Image (cartoon, helix red, strand yellow):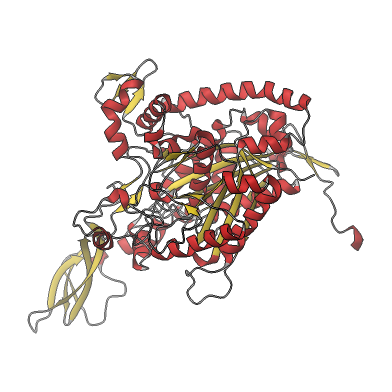
């Protein structure tokens, strides 16, 4: 019997807001929400963005005014909406209107006497060029004559052609929520996202950890660029060129394994499987696949799957921009025939577009095998029945599309039909498209969906594209898509691509339902989370709704098991409500176990059949299954 990986919690942060309890999804479909959900969304975003604070008694604005939750939309609503989703890059990242760089300058002497200047002795280059004439003025100062030309670099500023990004909500600062110790922004976001995901389960995490053997817990996470801020790789590669010193932390904290390591070391305290995979835009799905495979095989019973990318730096943006991959001001002006670019609409999946829009995000999903989820009374938010990954074969351009995504999509759809049936596939499935917003992607990705739909006789296949709202977060992009899928399952609202006026003429939309407005839909059963990544990193996940997941589990568990589960779920739901209320008031209490609860290796006990660790209720079994019995 193969274990079914159940989604029991999800948390994180991107340009739309907090992931838990679908806050980010609700921000995207804000105008389709009922009054209660709309009020909760504005309240949670107001405290997340530090526009209001709960002082233990009242909600108070930054001006000291007491405000009720029902008044937040009227008084702070415009500010909240303006400070979320894709927008002009804010100056806490860098100034897009005056982006700093080093410009070359060749200085030539105006006379035969050469170029003369005075400087500190310690500032002379080492070695001093042989043509320079250096005369000491005093022990610290020298006169220098350069007989020919002096090449220097000086501070300069340029108008950056790329001005928009999917940024965390304005005012959200994870560094102030815990003792962040000058950590890169991506790792700060990881601590927030992991805490949000764990708390969203409504389960006591110590109980969860001790419900299984210590090696049956896994953490699967990764980034692409690593941490490119000054505190990570960004500072490492820039420091000496800027005349500054490299710190002891920049190399270690820059590694793309660090999101995995931080979750293990500072949030969960796990000693189980630790895994990092990078696969361009499919990174989240690569890590999800590893977790799903381990749960199916029984190697892991609890999986924390994550991905993070906070790469809104001039260098990373210039790299993508030089490739022609990012939407820039000139391209947008031509598309809209205007001098005034709407930065909210730079990302236009399946519409007339000119490139993608980069974003920052951190997403974490908690998975359990179905037996453990039932035993603990976890909320069943859905299930991941499998994730398929395929490459593109021989290429000329490494970033060009290829056939791999046809394989992943077709396998995912075929599996869904085998398990859920033809009717569910045709009538109640939808696609979370990669939808990068490049002219090439809109054609090639839509052709894949067209051909798969044609093969499986699907018509009006619903398509949603999160990047229209949060941008392309690179590594966690598929996590953004999964979060939207769970939002659709929960709210029965299908997000339209509101940043486009119409579907582009070259999109293969005959079998697809792509709309430019949000709309209510019937309860959906199946979501296909698709990633069509750089370099041939293609992946598709088959995700089932809570309702369909329970229908399947009814075949595995009897009424007695379900009654026991229902009793435990009452407590889980109460704890979830408690956390949601606290989070909406900005009371996150991030989990950060820096040196707290370290294992004393002196208390570790090894026997022939088990290994006992202090602090864990269960022992690690050493009598592992020998798969090579025939070789004995």
Lateral position of residue 312 relative to residue 580, left or right: left
- Give me the residue at 40% from left, 17% from top: 56
- Give me the residue at 17% from left, 65% from top: 138
Between residue 201 and residue 270, name the one nearer to us: 201
Q: Quadrant of the C terminus?
A: bottom right
Vertical placement of 3 versus 285: above or below? above
Q: Is residue 219 visible?
A: no
Q: Quadrant of the N terminus?
A: top right
Between residue 206 and residue 463, name the one nearer to us: 463
Farthest residue in the left direction? 111
- Give me the residue at 35% from left, 62% from top: 240
Farthest residue in the bottom direction? 112
Disc count in the image?
Answer: 0
Give the image location of residue 175, x and y in percent. 40, 39
Q: Place residue 376 in its image quadrant.
A: top right
Lateral position of residue 594 relative to residue 96, left or right: right
Between residue 168 and residue 37, name the one nearer to us: 37
Give the image location of residue 185, x and y in percent. 41, 46
Vertical placement of 597 versus 299: above or below? above
- Give me the residue at 54% from left, 39% from top: 486
Lateral position of residue 471 relative to residue 620, left or right: left
Farthest residue in the top direction? 57
Lateral position of residue 416 relative to residue 35, left or right: right
Vertical placement of 376 versus 228: above or below? above
Give the image location of residue 143, x and y in percent. 15, 71
Vertical placement of 46 versus 189: above or below? above
Q: Is residue 150 visible?
A: yes
Give the image location of residue 538, x and y in percent. 56, 61
Between residue 586 and residue 25, name the one nearer to us: 25
């Amino acid at each position: 019997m193969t274990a079914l990986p159940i989604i029991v919690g999800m948390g994180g942060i991107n340009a739309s807001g907090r992931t838990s309890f679908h806050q980010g999804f609700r921000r995207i479909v804000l105008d389709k929400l009922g009054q209660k959900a709309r009020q909760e969304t504005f309240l949670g975003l107001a405290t997340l963005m530090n526009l209001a604070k709960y002082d233990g008694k009242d909600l108070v604005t930054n001006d000291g005014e007491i405000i009720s939750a029902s008044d937040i939309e009227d008084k702070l609503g415009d500010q909240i909406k303006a400070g979320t989703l894709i927008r002009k890059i804010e100056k806490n990242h860098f100034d897009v209107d005056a982006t700093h760089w080093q410009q070359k300058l060749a200085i030539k002497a105006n006379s035969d006497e050469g170029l003369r200047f005075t400087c500190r002795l310690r500032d002379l280059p080492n070695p001093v060029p042989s043509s320079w004439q250096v005369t000491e003025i005093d022990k610290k100062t020298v006169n220098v004559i350069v007989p020919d030309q002096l090449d220097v670099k000086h501070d300069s500023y340029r108008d950056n052609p790329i001005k928009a990004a999917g940024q965390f909500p304005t005012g959200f600062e994870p560094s102030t929520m815990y003792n962040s110790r000058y950590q890169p922004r991506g790792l700060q976001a990881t601590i927030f996202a992991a805490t949000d995901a764990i708390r969203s389960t409504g389960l006591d995490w110590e109980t969860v950890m001790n419900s299984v053997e210590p090696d049956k817990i896994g953490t699967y996470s990764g980034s692409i660029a690593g941490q490119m801020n000054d505190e990570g790789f960004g500072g490492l590669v820039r420091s000496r060129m800027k005349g500054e010193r490299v710190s002891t932390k920049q190399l270690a904290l820059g590694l793309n394994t660090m999101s995995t390591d931080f979750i293990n070391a500072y949030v969960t305290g796990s000693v189980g499987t630790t895994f990092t995979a990078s696969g361009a835009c499919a990174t989240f799905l690569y890590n999800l696949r590893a977790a799903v495979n381990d749960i199916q095989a029984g190697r892991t019973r609890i999986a924390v799957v994550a991905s993070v990318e906070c790469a809104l730096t001039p260098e990373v943006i210039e790299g993508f921009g030089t490739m022609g991959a990012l939407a820039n001001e000139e391209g947008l002006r031509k598309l809209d025939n205007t001098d005034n670019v709407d930065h909210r609409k730079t990302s236009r999946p399946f519409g007339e577009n000119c490139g993608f829009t980069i974003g920052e995000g951190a997403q974490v999903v908690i998975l359990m095998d179905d037996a453990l989820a039932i035993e603990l009374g976890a909320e069943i938010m859905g299930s991941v029945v499998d994730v398929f990954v395929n490459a593109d074969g021989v290429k000329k351009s490494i970033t060009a599309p290829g056939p791999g995504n046809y394989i992943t999509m077709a396998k995912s759809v075929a599996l869904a039909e085998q398990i859920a049936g033809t009717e569910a596939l045709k009538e109640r499935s939808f696609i979370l498209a990669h939808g990068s917003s490049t002219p090439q992607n809109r054609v090639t990705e839509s052709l894949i969906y067209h051909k798969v739909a044609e093969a499986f006789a699907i018509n009006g296949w619903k398509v949603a594209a999160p990047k229209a709202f949060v941008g392309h977060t690179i590594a966690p992009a598929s996590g953004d898509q999964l979060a939207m899928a769970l939002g659709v399952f929960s709210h029965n609202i299908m997000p339209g691509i509101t940043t486009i006026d119409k579907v582009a003429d070259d999109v293969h939309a005959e079998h697809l339902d792509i709309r430019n407005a949000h709309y209510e839909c019937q309860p959906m059963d199946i979501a296909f989370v698709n990633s069509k990544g750089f370099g041939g990193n293609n992946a598709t996940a088959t995700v089932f709704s809570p309702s369909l997941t329970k229908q399947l589990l009814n075949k595995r568990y009897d009424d007695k098991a379900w009654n026991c589960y229902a009793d435990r779920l009452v407590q889980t739901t109460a704890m979830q409500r408690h956390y949601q209320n606290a989070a909406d008031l900005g009371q996150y209490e991030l989990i950060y176990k820096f040196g707290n609860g370290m294992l004393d290796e002196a208390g570790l006990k090894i026997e022939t059949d088990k290994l006992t660790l202090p602090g864990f209720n269960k022992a690690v079994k050493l009598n592992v299954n020998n798969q090579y019995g025939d070789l004995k």
